[in-house]
């Protein structure tokens, strides 16, 4: 796994899965089938008094089964006898021991081909997930001292200027240095609609330049890019198992020794109850029982189903950090959301300025000088409104947790924040300030109220429909915000949110979420700011808005939405539900068929041919069912 900090390490040697099958197996199996057909056609008649068919069948058996036999032997040396490879080896060698050569070969041929198909399907699912996101360019054009050179992206430093031609992928995260350009962002967001970026706006690795030569100022190293982090998260996701996968793994470890014991009992127990007991007959039935009982359809198709679910979500701009979170999203009954940046755009604009003691322009300069030391969207709105015009210099700036900022400008003590900031410093202000609905930044100079600035945010286009969809799904909706209650209520009413709480400090959000959990709710929390990280960690499923979200929140989250659209929350739930439905269809199919054919085999009705066709057939059906997840629609 690559390191996300610093230089990308050397690619490690490819890990070989000892359970994987030889890529030449289909050819070898085809030859084995020819030998099988030759044996069925000619039997003993090629050379009199010579076991020609035994040799023919033995060659076919070795060609098709050497991989299975080798795996069974290596596992047996570690005293691991209860696995499908050892089970199949015992069954087929037993068939040879009682003279059922053709059936023994048929079992091995079809079982090996089935295993090869399963391996191929799992590898394809893993490759499709990796290929979906591992699209980082191998080279980049960097502009240094007016000269252009093509270099390895890993050698580009922060603040370098890179040039991206039409049709090329952006190699590194940065901000637009050219005036504007359009990009295809599908690799990151799942959205094919072009996205126009203007000078100063963020551009991410993996975006494709659509229209003209564009320059980008690099803001992150190659391995710190969002695309590298996405790839890391998706690769990690396949190793985090869901409860269903863990249950099946444990089930297989208990199930396999039990069927071994039942097969032995099926062979020897009838001796005490059947008058005309025939060892070969009952031994044959026990071999059929072993073949049918192989759990391969379960242990392969279920992980494949979860790989498919992760891939489906990734293609829609939703990153699950583990297949276990696909299951969790099907169980949540309450969606708790932050307001700013999650349900609203987080793009604030100054609406009204009221000054008591200074000219409006001067008050703005004081506020902007102080707010230029903050990355909060409200602070950025004030700085952008002043547009860099003769910014004053603020000194000794401190953040007052959950309230605002304080500092010195031209030797004067300045405060800028919410009304709680002024209350904290015992500064009186007009009561009408608290009655304003929009977000208010109050300013005090030398411990005296100086005025206020109102700022408004805009609700995201798909937020209203998303909340309606949540209600149709039977989900309770809750909104939490540090903004004042009047603003929170206004947004909640516009969206149709069930419950809304404002005036919350970060620890207040944590307490609210804990209270909801204590009430027996299973919750998903959606947020984007660094102050949301503790709540994201506390939730049963933590969801981060990955486009505008802070690195801390994205790192803490279980699920990341790449394009910041609230509609992806319900899409994530749909991805989990589809995956769970397919996985349980496979479990029901595999177990149902096995129980029926096990009963037929124990009763002597099913033979080895029918057993292997049932086993391999069920496995292939389950695989095909799992693979179709990736073609489904979750929006």
Image (cartoon, helix red, strand yellow):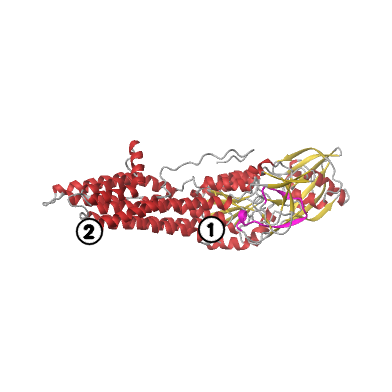
Q: Mark 1 points at which residue?
A: 475
Earlier sequence position, callout 2 versus callout 1: 1
Indicate the secondary structure of the residue bearing disc 1.
loop
User: Residue shown at 61%/54% (left/top)?
Assistant: 187
The percent coordinates of residue 480 (x first, y second) are 63, 51
In the rendered structure, which segment of residues is drawn in magenta?
Answer: 170-190
Indicate the secondary structure of the residue bearing disc 2.
loop
Total numbered circles: 2
Q: How crowded is mark 1: few (under 14 residues within 10 Å), some or many (20 or more)?
A: some
The percent coordinates of residue 486 (x first, y second) are 69, 55
Q: Residue furthest front?
A: 47
Q: Which residue is nearer to you in this view: 31 or 474?
A: 31
Q: Mark 2 points at which residue?
A: 605
Q: Which residue is nearer to you in this view: 297 or 479?
A: 297
Q: Which residue is nearer to you in this view: 347 or 593?
A: 593
- Whether residue 172 appears in this view of the structure is no
- Whether residue 20 appears in this view of the structure is yes
Query: Contact (CB < 8 A) between labels 2 and 1?
Result: no
Q: Which residue lies furthest to the left in this view?
A: 275
- In which quadrant will I find the N terminus? top right
Q: Residue furthest right?
A: 359
């Amino acid at each position: 796994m690559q390191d996300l900090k610093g230089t990308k390490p050397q690619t490690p040697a490819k890990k070989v899965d000892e359970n994987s099958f030889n890529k030449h197996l289909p050819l070898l199996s085809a030859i084995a089938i020819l030998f099988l057909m030759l044996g069925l056609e000619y039997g003993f008649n090629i050379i009199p008094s010579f076991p020609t068919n035994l040799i023919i069948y033995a060659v076919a058996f070795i060609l098709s089964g050497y991989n299975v036999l080798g795996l069974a032997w290596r596992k047996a040396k570690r005293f691991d006898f209860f696995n499908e490879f050892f089970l199949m080896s015992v069954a087929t060698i037993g068939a040879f021991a009682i003279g059922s050569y053709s059936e023994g070969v048929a079992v091995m041929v079809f079982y090996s081909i089935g295993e090869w198909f399963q391996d191929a399907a799992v590898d394809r699912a893993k490759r499709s997930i990796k290929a979906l996101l591992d699209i980082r360019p191998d080279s980049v054009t960097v502009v240094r001292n007016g000269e252009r050179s093509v270099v390895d992206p890993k050698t580009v430093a922060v603040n370098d200027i890179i040039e991206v031609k039409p049709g090329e992928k952006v190699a590194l995260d940065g901000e637009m240095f050219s005036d504007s350009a359009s990009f295809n962002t599908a690799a990151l967001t799942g959205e094919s609609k072009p996205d126009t970026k203007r000078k100063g706006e963020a551009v991410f690795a993996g975006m494709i330049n659509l229209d003209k030569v564009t320059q980008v100022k690099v803001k992150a190293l190659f391995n710190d890019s969002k695309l590298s982090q996405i790839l890391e998260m998706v690769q990690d996701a396949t190793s985090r198992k869901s409860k269903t996968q863990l249950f099946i793994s444990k089930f297989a470890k208990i199930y396999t020794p039990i069927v071994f014991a039942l097969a032995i009992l099926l062979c020897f127990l009838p001796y005490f109850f059947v008058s005309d007991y025939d060892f070969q007959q009952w031994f044959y039935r026990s071999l059929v029982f072993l073949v049918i009982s192989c759990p391969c359809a379960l242990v392969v198709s279920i992980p494949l189903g979860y790989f498919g679910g992760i891939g489906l979500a990734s293609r829609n701009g939703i990153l699950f950090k583990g297949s276990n979170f696909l299951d969790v999203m099907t169980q949540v009954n309450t969606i708790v959301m932050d307001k700013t940046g999650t349900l609203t755009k987080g793009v604030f604009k100054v609406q009204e300025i009221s000054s008591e003691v200074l000219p409006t322009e001067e008050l703005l300069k004081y506020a902007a000088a102080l707010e230029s030391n903050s990355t909060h969207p409200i602070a950025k709105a004030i700085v952008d409104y002043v547009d860099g015009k003769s910014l004053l210099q603020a000194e000794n700036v401190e953040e007052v947790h959950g309230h605002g900022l304080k500092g010195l400008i031209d030797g004067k003590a300045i405060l800028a924040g919410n009304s709680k900031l002024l209350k904290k410093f015992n500064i009186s202000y007009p009561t009408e300030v608290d009655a304003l609905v929009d977000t208010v930044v109050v300013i005090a100079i030398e411990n005296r109220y100086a005025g206020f600035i109102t700022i408004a945010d805009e609700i995201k286009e798909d937020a209203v429909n998303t909340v309606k969809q949540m209600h149709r799904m039977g989900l309770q909706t809750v909104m939490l915000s540090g903004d004042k209650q009047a603003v929170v209520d206004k947004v909640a009413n516009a969206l149709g949110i069930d419950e809304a709480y404002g005036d919350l400090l970060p620890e207040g959000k944590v307490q609210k979420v804990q209270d909801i959990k204590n009430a027996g709710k299973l919750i998903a929390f959606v947020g984007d700011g660094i102050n949301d990280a503790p709540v994201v960690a506390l939730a049963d499923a933590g969801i981060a808005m990955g486009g505008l979200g802070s690195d801390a929140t994205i790192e803490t989250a279980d699920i990341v939405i790449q394009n910041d659209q609230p509609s992806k929350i319900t899409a994530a739930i749909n991805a989990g539900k589809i995956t769970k439905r397919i996985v349980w269809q496979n479990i029901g199919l595999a177990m149902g068929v096995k129980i029926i054919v096990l009963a037929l085999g124990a009763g002597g009705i099913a033979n080895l041919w029918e057993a292997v066709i049932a086993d391999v057939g069920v496995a292939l059906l389950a695989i095909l069912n799992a693979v179709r997840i990736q073609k489904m629609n979750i929006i």
